[in-house]
Image: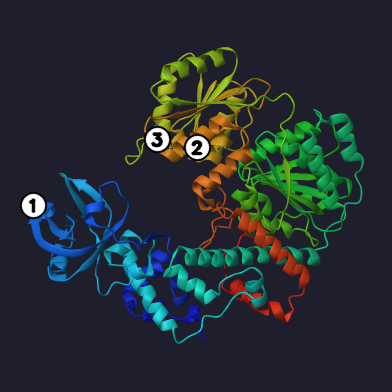
Amino acid sequence: MFDLSTRDIKFLQGVGPQRAAILNKELHIYSFRDLLYYFPYKYVDRSRLYYISEINGNMPYIQLRGKVLSFETFGEGRQRRLVAHFSDGTGVVDLVWFQGLKFVMGKYNTTEEYVVFGKPTVFNGRINIAHPDIDPAEELTLSAMGMQPYYNTTEKMKRSNLTSQMIQKLMKHLFVALEKEEIAETMSENLIRKYSLVSLPEALHQIHFPQNADMLRKAQYRLKFEELFYIQLNILRYTKERRSRFRGLMFEHVGEKFNTFYSQYLPFALTGAQKRVIKEMRRDMGSGRQMNRLLQGDVGSGKTLVALMTMLIALDNGFQACMMAPTEILATQHHETICKFLNGMDVRVELLTGSVKGKRREKILKDLLTGDVHILIGTHAVIEDTVNFSSLGLVVVDEQHRFGVAQRAKLWAKNTCPPHVLVMTATPIPRTLAMTLYGDLDVSVIDELPPGRKPIQTVHQFDNRRASMYAFIRKQIQEGRQAYIVYPLIQESEKMDIKNLEEGYLHICEEFPEYKVSKVHGKMKPAEKDAEMQRFLANKTQIMVATTVIEVGVNVPNASVMVIENAERFGLSQLHQLRGRVGRGADQSYCILVTGYKLSEDTRKRIQIMVDTNDGFEIAEADLKLRGPGDLEGTQQSGVAFDLKIADIAKDGQLLQYVREIAERMLEEDPQGIKPEYAVVWQQLKEMRKRNVNWSVIS
């Protein structure tokens, strides 16, 4: 038995150094194992042969058996094409090539029988199949095996003849090379038996060369089961180890600061959801184990207030608290909000960002060490080595997907006993995704909006109806409200025909000469951006033209209209985040999604979902199904990018839940990892950790 991961791909028959270099760069395939686990993205059933008399131009892929009657060439130079008249005795179709004409003429003849595979279309009243797959009928193995796999390839690969068919050929060579070797099983026998799984060697063979649809399903199930099982086992074991290693600070009581705030300073009654979440956190922090909790709550649901009350519990137990936000705007806003909440209380709150310099910075750092600063709010500046605390007891991380794992870990290390951790996000995360992205965090959800908030009304408008839209915006401003207009780009892009911010800003200034207009985008200096934001907040400007920089961290209760230009260019979660910038006061607010007429089916669905619901979790579930986890905002920045080979978090949610329960039961049976019947599983987990499998583990 040899280790497939140590066999260099260049030594496989048909590869060599040049192709190996392309496979390395384009697909990250370096070894025999990498190729073996490069799975097809689709399959076409080639078990049926059609007669030419049966087919028409509206059919999907079809397969024919017959002979070439004759070849003809048409046109000159680049317009030149080769046509082979192909017949099976029931009719004639034209096989057409626009490239590789000399190769085709040299390879095929009019005496042999072939099996032709491709998509029929109609041109000039005749059925054509462009660039078909052709195999000699006597040599053909594809139709015998039934299902033809298709592998994703890049343009660069195709230029070097590394097509899907060539990958399939290399896969055949790989399985020939493996005939003398045994592929090691990666699941224990009792699990294979108990959960009716096919063996790993069988699953790998059937995934690349399926005998039929049933065998393909069994192979896919086995490989998905294993992939999700090890992710969940890794997360659960990691959580168990962390909890046994870190006892956590004991916050034994809720004291004067919390009670004073609750009875005298609370600006409005807490919702039932806020009370429930605070209780969950009090229980965690008083349990003697480190709290590691994710707080999910839609935009405007009152997460900041919950975080503040949790920080006051830390203060009551003699500890400091720290809150980290991804941008200076958001950190400043949190500082202002919390200072406003605590106005009159004996709690010192300081702000630390890149802009805080000189003596002011020195004073904050000195007072943090003495414990005179109770709550520190800041950007990533708070994780610098020069920032040290007297006794850090609680860390709150807002919009955590903007921070990498290593950045957060620096905060945990600022106390000998790791502080309690509260991670907050306004991006609702579907349950299946949360189990993988945040599998080791306990999850709390604020699923109620504060009383008095009205649901935002969302409408879809085509861009040729601007006059009525502008009249509506003008009416809202006349009533004392303000409006956002968001564009996807800052400057014109030749490749994309979309409205850009610079043009849009000039257009809005002309359209609304009687009002002041702000402009904000990501390329502005922080001070300029802040100045524009402050002008809008103070109602010195009535319209803000912006890019998605305003998605997080702008709280203007007076703004009641959000116009999103080219809404088709945004994902659902991003549209939902942008919509959440309005509806923060007691007035009715509106979101207008502006698009052109030409929209894909997926885009129409996305827009309709936004119009139909304000529920962030419903939107996140839909986004996951429409776009897949890799595209969801946050999964790439979080340091936990997905590396799934075959499972799909959106489609395999039930299987994910099922394997998590199996992994939990196994951990209960064998907490020390010493039972012989699970030896294969623990060894495999060890090997996967060695290979640095890119798993989603937080903190």
Instruction: Identify the mark at residue 606; answer none if there is no mark.
Output: 2
Give the residue displayed 75% in from the left and 36% down from the top. Answer: 338
Disc 3, SS: loop
Q: Return the x and y of residue 609 as percentages of the image width and height.
A: 54, 35
Question: Hey, what amino acid is under mark 3?
Answer: Leu
Which residue is identified by label 3?
599
Give the residue displayed 80% in from the left and 62% down from the top. Answer: 416
Q: Return the x and y of residue 86 as percentages of the image width and height.
A: 16, 60
Dot 2 alpha-carbon crowd within 10 angstroms: few under 14, some 14 to 19, many 20 or more: many
Q: Is residue 145 left or right of residue 514?
A: left
Disc 2, SS: helix
Instruction: Identify the mark at residue 314; answer none if there is no mark.
Output: none
Q: Is residue 406 left or right of residue 26?
A: right
Q: Return the x and y of residue 637 as percentages of the image width and height.
A: 56, 52
- In this rendering, the answer to whether 494 lies above or below 178 is above
Question: Hey, what amino acid is under mark 2?
Answer: Arg
- Report the quarter where the C terminus lies: bottom right
CB under 8 Å between discs 2 and 3? no
CB under 8 Å between discs 2 and 1? no
Q: Earlier in the sequence, mark 1 or mark 3?
A: 1
Which residue is identified by label 1?
75
How far apart are the alpha carbons under marks 2 and 3?
10 Å
Q: Is residue 372 visible?
A: no
How far apart are the alpha carbons under marks 1 and 3?
37 Å
Dot 3 alpha-carbon crowd within 10 angstroms: few under 14, some 14 to 19, many 20 or more: few
Q: Nearer the viewer, residue 205 or 26?
A: 205
Q: Is residue 9 visible?
A: yes
Picture quadrant of residue 449? top right
Disc 1, SS: loop
Dot 1 alpha-carbon crowd within 10 angstroms: few under 14, some 14 to 19, many 20 or more: few
- In this rendering, the answer to whether 363 lies above or below 3 is above
- In this rendering, the answer to whether 689 lies above or below 582 is below
